[in-house]
Image: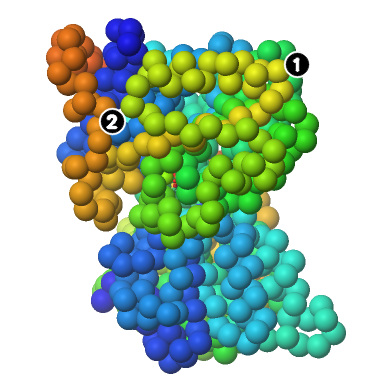
């Protein structure tokens, strides 16, 4: 099953399980079913629960927050995550704040879905990975879609948390297969943390969000075949707040740790992960945690220029080699 | 209509057709939004603009660009990421900057910026012209800008290409009330026009645009037909072939066939020439 079908099924289940749950976003109606088809069939199956909206990201996110404030579950799709900047106020200053700023805990079941990332030649305003701007907002959880995490469980966890969540969905994942990891690697999942590995202790532990999975595994394969370097990949579903305990346990024995993400350089999620690991493993790690990310640059449209900016399999491969020096 | 206007209309038409053709053949990467059916708007409006006026375009901007600059090769190179690209292939189809012309792919973003440019230009006799679609009236920034434009007497010309649809969403599902009433609420002048005759459009707009230059903002709402998909292969409408098309209406006019062949050949040679160029370079 493709990732987009898994996500679509998960959305179906949320709307079916709770007739009060609603989904809002631009161009969601069938037969189009949303720009990336994640919502295909939903407006037909749940006509009363799916609202197609004007081009009003700020307002529709606020409407989602209003539904959540009234105790309902709301899922808002922003067509391209780049436009979430228009909804930043509603997410940061209303939805997330409301969880605690009134002196009592207010449950807010709001999920903002964010098709994300580059690699498709959509240009500087349709290709960004803005996760880092949402790291460390009190009351807000940051999740990322992954081919190793069943979206039914991920959405269920977000709803159960009763906190507003932003859900980054790397667009290149939609057409990839769920749970496909080829030999010699295998994968497992414990407490929301997916692990891709071979049956041997790793030289390097790579930590990456779901959208980077395929690039990381490709780098791991090359390192194994060409240099006999063994890597383990860890993919958390929730990027923030970070459950650092399991990462620490896995990183403790490795010779190096690399955090890889598609975000452009500066103030990254990886910098936060590195800091947390340094706090726990200072004196244990042989080298500082290394970061792999896209260049400090806008994301160009032309594919040859875009490739030179974005995080690739090679970026990860080279960062791992460097980290082991 | 002068030959130049017809040539421009046909250049835009053939340019857009060529793009869809290149996409179909897998020779273009990314995405693009063609203005097939809407060509008359930028050709008519550009004829009323001077060299000091600033133009703000949007995602559907090839016609806006080609009506302002005689540069199909530079635009195609931008879209294909080839040498000679207007912006080095960085911006692509919807992010272009050149000589007082700028486009961006985020809906509604341009209007406050256009108001800022209009504030800069106020008193100079020049104006800021911003093209937006009907769907973009969903964004709050549009209203904040109209308020400022009226309040501050800004030389702002807003050209609305009302094609009745935003991506796949018909206007009825996205707009309560109408654009005229929204403008009236802000005390901004509004005029609605069909977009089927360049000369007729200019005759109506000429005096109105002159008064924009002295600080009286104006919204011109054109009724147009989007004859192509939103981007590519994503049209959910039926009956598109029956929509009125200036190209079909004019095809019997004297000189049309010759002009059409000229534009077709021109675009054809531009495509061949640009395709053969090396990749664009960008010094980050
Ligand atoms: C802020 C923002 N939201 C969503 C989009 C995606 N999008 C691109 S074009 C478009 C429809 C625009 O409709 P309209 O303004 O009517 O212009 P048209 O495409 O019809 O020319 C949408 C939703 C965007 N580019 N920017
Ligand atoms: Mg429209």
Label 2 CB less than 8 angstroms from ligand 1: no
Picture disc at residue B123 = 1
In the image, B275 versus B241, the foreground residue is B241
Residue A247 % position (x, y): 58, 78
Asked if B6 appears above or below B172 in the picture, the reply is above
Q: Does dot 1 land on a helix, a strand or a loop?
A: loop
Residue B246 % position (x, y): 26, 27
- Disc 2 or disc 1, which is closer to the eye? 1
Asked if B279 appears above or below A193 in the picture, the reply is above
Question: Which residue is at a point 64% across and 22% down the rendered structure image?
Answer: B212
Q: Name the residue under label 2.
A: B16
Question: Which residue is at a point 59% across and 46% down the rendered structure image?
Answer: B181
Looking at the rendered image, the quarter that the C terminus of chain B falls into is top right
Residue at the right extreme of this rendering: A103
Q: What is the chain identity of the residue bearing mark 1?
A: B
Q: Is residue A80 visible?
A: yes
Q: Judge from the rendering whether residue B19 lies leftward or rightward of residue A271; answer left or right.
A: left
Residue B236 % position (x, y): 27, 55
Residue A263, quarter of picture: bottom right
């Amino acid at each position: 099953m493709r990732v987009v079908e898994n996500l679509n099924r998960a959305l179906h289940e949320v709307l079916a399980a709770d007739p009060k749950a609603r989904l809002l976003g631009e161009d969601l109606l069938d037969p189009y079913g949303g720009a990336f088809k994640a919502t295909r069939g939903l407006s037909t199956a749940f006509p009363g629960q799916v609202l197609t909206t004007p081009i009003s990201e700020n307002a529709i996110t606020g409407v989602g927050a209003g539904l959540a404030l009234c105790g309902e579950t709301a899922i808002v799709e922003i067509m391209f995550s780049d436009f979430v900047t228009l909804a930043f106020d509603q997410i940061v200053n209303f939805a997330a704040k409301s969880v605690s700023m009134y002196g009592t805990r207010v449950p807010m079941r709001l999920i903002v879905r964010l098709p994300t990332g580059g690699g498709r030649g959509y240009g500087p305003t349709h290709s960004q990975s803005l996760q880092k701007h949402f790291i460390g907002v009190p009351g807000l959880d940051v999740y990322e879609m992954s081919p190793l995490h069943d979206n039914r469980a991920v959405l269920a966890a977000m709803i159960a948390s009763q906190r507003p969540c932003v859900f980054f969905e790397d667009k290149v994942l939609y057409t990839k297969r769920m749970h496909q990891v080829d030999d010699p690697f295998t994968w497992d999942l414990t407490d929301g943390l997916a692990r891709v590995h071979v049956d041997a202790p790793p030289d390097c532990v790579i930590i990456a969000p779901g959208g980077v999975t395929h690039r990381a595994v490709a780098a791991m394969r090359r390192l194994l075949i060409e240099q006999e370097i063994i890597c383990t990949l860890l993919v958390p579903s929730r990027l923030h707040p970070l459950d650092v305990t399991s990462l620490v346990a896995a990183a403790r024995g490795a010779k190096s740790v690399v955090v890889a993400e598609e975000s452009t350089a500066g103030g990254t999620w990886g910098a936060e992960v590195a800091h947390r690991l340094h706090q726990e493993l200072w004196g244990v790690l042989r080298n500082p945690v290394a970061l792999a990310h896209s260049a400090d640059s806008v994301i160009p449209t032309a594919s040859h220029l875009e490739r030179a900016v974005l995080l690739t399999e090679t970026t990860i491969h080279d960062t791992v080699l460097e980290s082991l020096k | 209509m002068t030959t130049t206007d017809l040539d421009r209309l046909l250049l835009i038409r053939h340019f857009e057709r060529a793009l869809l053709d290149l996409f179909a053949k897998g020779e273009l990467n990314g995405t693009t939004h063609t203005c097939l059916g809407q060509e008359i708007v930028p050709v008519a409006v550009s004829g009323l603009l001077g060299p000091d006026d600033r133009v703000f375009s949007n995602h559907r901007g090839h016609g806006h660009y080609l009506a302002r600059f005689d540069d199909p090769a530079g635009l195609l190179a931008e879209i294909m990421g080839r040498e000679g690209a207007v912006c080095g292939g960085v911006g692509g189809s919807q992010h272009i900057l050149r000589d007082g012309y700028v486009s961006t792919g985020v809906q509604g973003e341009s209007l406050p910026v256009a108001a800022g440019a209009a504030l800069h230009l106020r008193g100079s006799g020049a104006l800021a012209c911003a093209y937006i679609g009907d769907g973009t009236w969903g964004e709050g920034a549009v209203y904040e800008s109209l308020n400022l434009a009226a309040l501050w007497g800004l030389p702002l010309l807003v050209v609305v290409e009302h094609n009745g649809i935003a991506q796949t969403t018909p206007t009825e599902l996205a707009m309560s009330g109408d654009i005229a009433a929204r403008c009236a609420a802000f005390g901004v002048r509004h005029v609605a026009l069909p977009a089927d005759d360049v000369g007729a459009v200019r005759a109506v707009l000429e005096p109105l645009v002159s008064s924009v230059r002295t600080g009286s903002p104006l919204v011109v709402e054109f009724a147009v037909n989007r004859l192509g998909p939103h981007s590519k292969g994503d049209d959910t409408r039926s009956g598109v072939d029956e929509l009125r098309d200036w190209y079909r209406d004019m095809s019997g006019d004297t000189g049309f066939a010759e002009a059409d062949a000229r534009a077709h050949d021109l675009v054809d040679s531009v495509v061949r020439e640009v395709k053969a160029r090396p990749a664009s370079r960008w010094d980050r």
